Image (cartoon, rainbow, N blue to C red):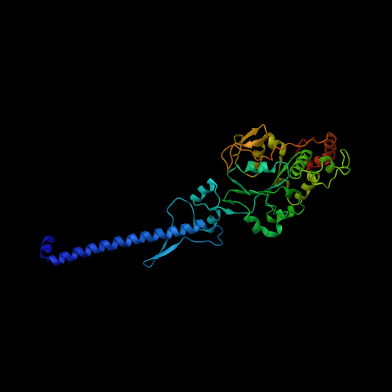
């Protein structure tokens, strides 16, 4: 039947039919080519604008184009993990391999106020504690001392949150500023931010701590007076201790701790021994991980002891995969202090140390 119908068609009709078919194929090919080219140009334009943005102020949806009356949303098909919302854009600057991976999985880090604070004590090992605990994948910490609760409190919590690192659900946000421990207003301010905040305190023999504090100050001021002249009112060893001098005042730990205990129960504080943090960092970091409710991931495999510096160093960290120490200022040699001055300071600190042992329930064994 088809053959008979075909033989009845004129040559002209057949020719017209073939031309129409060819035209339809050409139009279809052209349309699809233009459609794909349009989508590709729009995606490239959107991708370029995203990578150049640094401080977005509002959430941005994936770009859209209108094709033949229909709205088409452009969704990236590449695996670069960059989204179209402000949270991802803010975090695009985070170069950590871990966070690049998280973005590829569609997770969206955001900034939060800290869950835990390293509040002190200066020159006791706070930087070491921070760097050691940051080895844990569930801990994210501000890289520098923010000084919110002592210097910048008037700027508000929004300002403070902006200085925190991006985290995902299940991670702990942490910040370290050692001067919080001795700042009178800090306990109340931290409590008002979050009464459940966990507080970490690194302490060290107050005499050794005072000498270390002085050593750091003298490295910045070469014409500084001798330690003995600053630590005693009469300027000689064995005299009256100058309790107004910063390096001495900070070491009266019990006095400062009592202010914190007015707002926080002892269960929300952990006291890390600065001496043990150097001698056996894995043990102290294990205690800290338990206190923070973390799985014990950081262990002795992460550390090695540098005999030249007399200080533990890291085999690897989040930023660096090669072995490295904390810095040239760590393990700095102390100047010689007259034995009589050291003995007088130990005598001065003894009752305060005993009071501190009673408050914490820990005997640190300082001489």
Q: Is residue 289 visible?
A: no
- Residue 322 screen position, x and y as percent: 57, 38
Of all residues shown, which one is farthest toward the top? 307
Q: Is residue 300 above or below residue 181?
A: above
Please name whichever residue, 237 or 244, is drawn nearer the observer in this view of the structure: 237
Q: Is residue 12 left or right of residue 156?
A: left
Q: Is residue 164 above or below residue 72?
A: above
Residue located at (74% from left, 54% from top): 188
Please name whichever residue, 136 or 94, is drawn nearer the observer in this view of the structure: 94
Q: Quadrant of residue 289?
A: top right
- Residue 40 screen position, x and y as percent: 40, 58
Q: Is residue 269 left or right of residue 22?
A: right
Q: Quadrant of residue 127?
A: top right
Q: Is residue 23 visible?
A: yes
- Residue 74 screen position, x and y as percent: 43, 59
**Quadrant where the N terminus lies?**
bottom left
Residue located at (19% from left, 63% from top): 18
- Residue 198 screen position, x and y as percent: 68, 48
Q: Is residue 84 left or right of residue 211?
A: left
**Quadrant where the C terminus lies?**
top right
Residue located at (80% from left, 46% from top): 249
Badge count: 0
Q: Is residue 107 above or below residue 318?
A: below
Please name whichever residue, 117 or 94, is drawn nearer the observer in this view of the structure: 94
Of all residues shown, which one is farthest toward the bottom? 69
Of all residues shown, which one is farthest toward the front? 223
């Amino acid at each position: 039947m088809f053959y008979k119908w075909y033989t009845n068609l004129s040559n002209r009709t057949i020719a017209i039919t073939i031309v129409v078919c060819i035209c339809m194929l050409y139009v279809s090919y052209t349309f699809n080519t233009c459609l794909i080219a349009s989508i590709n140009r729009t995606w490239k334009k959107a991708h370029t604008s995203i990578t150049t943005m640094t401080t977005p102020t509002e959430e941005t949806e994936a770009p859209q184009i209108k094709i033949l009356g229909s709205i088409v949303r452009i969704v990236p098909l590449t695996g670069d993990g960059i989204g179209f919302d402000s949270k991802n854009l803010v975090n695009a600057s985070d170069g950590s391999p871990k966070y690049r991976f998280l973005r590829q999985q569609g997770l969206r880090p955001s900034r939060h106020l800290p869950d835990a604070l390293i509040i002190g004590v200066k020159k006791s090992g706070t930087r070491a504690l921070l760097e050691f605990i940051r080895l844990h994948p569930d801990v994210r910490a501000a890289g520098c001392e923010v000084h919110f609760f002592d210097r910048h409190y008037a700027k508000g919590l929004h300002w403070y949150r902006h200085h925190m690192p991006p985290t995902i659900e299940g991670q702990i946000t942490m910040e370290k500023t050692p001067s919080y421990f001795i700042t009178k207003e800090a306990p109340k301010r931290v409590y008002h931010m979050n009464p459940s905040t966990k507080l970490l305190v690194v302490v060290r023999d107050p005499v050794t701590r005072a000498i270390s504090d002085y050593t750091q100050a003298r490295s910045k001021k070469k014409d500084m007076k001798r330690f003995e002249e600053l630590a005693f009112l009469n300027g000689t060893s064995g005299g009256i201790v100058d309790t107004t001098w910063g390096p001495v005042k900070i070491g009266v730990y019990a006095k400062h701790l009592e202010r914190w205990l007015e707002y926080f129960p002892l269960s929300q504080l952990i006291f890390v021994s600065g001496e043990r943090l150097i001698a056996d960092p894995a043990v102290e970091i294990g205690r800290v991980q338990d206190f923070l409710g973390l799985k014990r991931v950081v262990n002795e495999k992460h550390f090695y002891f540098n005999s030249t510096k007399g200080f533990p160093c890291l085999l690897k960290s989040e930023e660096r995969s090669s072995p490295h120490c904390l810095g040239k200022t760590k393990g700095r040699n102390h100047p010689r202090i007259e034995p009589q001055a050291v003995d007088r300071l130990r005598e001065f600190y003894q009752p305060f140390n005993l009071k501190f042992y009673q408050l914490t329930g820990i005997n640190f064994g300082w001489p």
